């Protein structure tokens, strides 16, 4: 496997993990906001 391809694969993997983390964090924050009854 070429080093460039490997690096791109790693970057895509890290990006995907970051996006998943952001989505989960957003959902948790929204859930807490809804439970508290306030907008934020």
Image: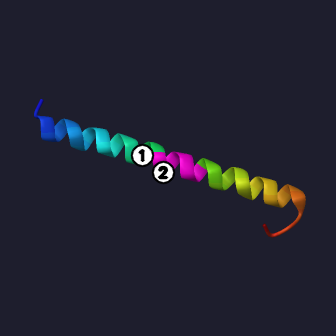
Q: In the rendered view, does 22 fall on the left or right side of 9?
A: right
Q: In the rendered view, does 5 fall on the left or right side of 22?
A: left
- Residue drawn at x 72%, y 55% as measured from the top left: 29
Which disc, if any, is residue 19? 2
The secondary structure that dominates the magenta segment is: helix
Q: Does the CB distance between marks 2 and 1 fall below 8 Å?
A: yes
Q: In the rendered view, does 7 fall on the left or right side of 23?
A: left
- Residue drawn at x 55%, y 52% as measured from the top left: 22
- Residue drawn at x 39%, y 42% as measured from the top left: 14
11 in magenta: no
Q: Residue 30 appears at what percent x and percent y?
A: 73, 58
Q: Residue 25 appears at what percent x and percent y?
A: 63, 50
Q: In whole angstroms, how far apart are the C-alphas of marks 2 and 1?
A: 5 Å
Q: Residues within 10 Å of mark 1 (few under 14, many from 20)?
A: few
Q: Examine the rendered structure and indicate whether residue 5 appears above or below residue 15.
A: above
Give the magenta-colored segment's residue range. 18-23
Q: Quadrant of the C terminus?
A: bottom right
- Residue drawn at x 88%, y 58% as measured from the top left: 36
Q: Residue 33 appears at what percent x and percent y?
A: 80, 60
Residue at the spot of label 1: 16
């Amino acid at each position: 496997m070429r080093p460039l391809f490997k690096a791109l694969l790693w970057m895509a993997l890290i990006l995907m993990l970051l996006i998943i983390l952001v989505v989960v964090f957003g959902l948790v924050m929204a859930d807490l906001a809804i439970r508290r009854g306030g907008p934020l």
